[in-house]
Structures are given as structure tokens and as C-alpha cells.
Image (spheres, rainbow, N blue to C red):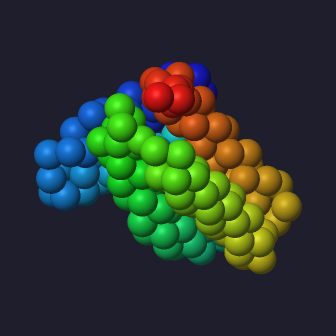
């Protein structure tokens, strides 16, 4: 499990490093990240044969929405990087409120799809989905926090 999180984290942070180049590269990195992530999810989430098709259809739908939020996260990180040296108190406040709102949207997306997965499978599969998504998300958030410098008052 740890190797998948490490791989996903490296791919995610790599997408951040390349994010300033162009939209096509971001899309390419997210596609690569999505494939590796899907493999990790497949190793952890175990729907029955009867549930499998419905689960993966829902999972692909979830990933499409998650990637939209991921692009917003990258944009916020780019904004922080661009403004870090000169960020005013007002800019910091606006940026932080956007980050908080995005985290809420991400957490709500996972919760919404927990309910959808449970509706087409059972509580075990839904919990497995919830656990792996939160595990990966927490690992990514921790890596971002470790690599983003703290803002200092000028």
C-alpha cells in the first residue's frame, strides 16, 4: 500500500512541478496519475463479481469529478507560488478561503460517492472506497504541506 501512495504522491507533486508549463501537460500527468491510482484502488477495493461493473462505472465518474478539483488545487498552488514572495494579508485571506472551500468540496465528493458505492454494493466495499480515497488524499495533502513554504509576514 505504501508504495502506491508514494508513487501517487510523486506523480501528483510532479504534476505540480510541471503545472506552470501548460494545460496539456497537466492533463497528461493527471491521466498517468489516474491509471496508477486506479490500479491501487483495484488492489484495495474488492467488489463482488456482480458489483464490479457498477463499481468501476461509478469510480470513473468519481475520478472525472475529482480531476476537476485536482486542477483547481494545482491552480491554487500555482497562485501561491506566484504570490508567495509578495503576498499581502488580503491575498493570503482570499487564497486560504479558496483552499478551505476546495477541501470541503473534495471531502464532500468522497462522501457523496461513498453513498453511491454503498447503494450499488455494500458497506464493506463502500468503506474500502472511502478508506483508500482518504488515505491517498491525506498522503497527498501531507506531501503538499511538507513542500510548500510557510508564509511569513513581510
Does residue 125 sit above or below 135 in this rendering?
below
Place of residue 61 in the rendered image (x, y in percent of width and height, measured from the top left): 50, 72
Does residue 4 sit above or below 137 in this rendering?
above
Side (left or right) of 70 relative to 16? right
- Front-lying residue, 85 or 122: 85
Q: Outermost residue, right direction? A: 123
**Residue 46 visible somewhere in the drawing:** no
Place of residue 66 in the rendered image (x, y in percent of width and height, measured from the top left): 50, 62
Q: Residue at x 39, y 28 (%)?
A: 10
Does residue 153 sit above or below 133 in this rendering?
above
Q: Residue at x 52, y 53 (%)?
A: 90
**Residue 51 visible somewhere in the drawing:** yes
Q: Residue at x 60, y 57 (%)?
A: 97
Place of residue 87 in the rendered image (x, y in percent of width and height, measured from the top left): 42, 41
Give the number of callouts: 0
- Front-lying residue, 7 or 51: 7
- Front-lying residue, 5 or 104: 104
Place of residue 152 in the rendered image (x, y in percent of width and height, measured from the top left): 52, 26
Q: Residue at x 71, y 71 (%)?
A: 112
Question: Splitting the image into 4 quarters, where does residue 58 fall?
Answer: bottom right
Q: Which image quarter is the N terminus in?
A: top right
Amino acid at each position: 500500500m505504501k508504495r502506491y501512495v508514494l508513487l501517487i504522491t510523486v506523480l501528483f507533486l510532479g504534476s505540480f512541478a510541471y503545472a506552470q508549463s501548460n494545460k496539456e501537460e497537466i492533463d497528461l500527468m493527471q491521466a498517468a496519475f489516474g491509471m496508477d491510482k486506479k490500479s491501487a484502488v483495484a488492489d484495495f477495493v474488492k467488489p463482488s463479481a456482480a458489483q464490479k461493473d457498477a463499481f468501476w462505472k461509478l469510480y470513473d465518474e468519481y475520478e472525472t469529478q475529482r480531476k476537476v478539483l485536482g486542477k483547481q488545487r494545482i491552480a491554487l498552488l500555482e497562485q501561491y507560488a506566484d504570490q508567495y514572495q509578495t503576498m499581502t494579508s488580503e491575498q493570503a485571506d482570499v487564497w486560504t478561503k479558496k483552499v478551505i472551500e476546495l477541501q470541503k468540496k473534495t471531502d464532500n465528493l468522497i462522501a457523496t460517492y461513498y453513498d453511491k458505492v454503498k447503494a450499488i454494493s455494500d458497506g464493506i466495499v463502500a468503506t474500502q472506497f472511502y478508506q483508500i480515497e482518504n488515505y491517498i488524499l491525506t498522503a497527498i495533502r501531507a506531501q503538499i504541506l511538507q513542500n510548500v513554504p510557510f508564509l511569513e509576514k513581510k
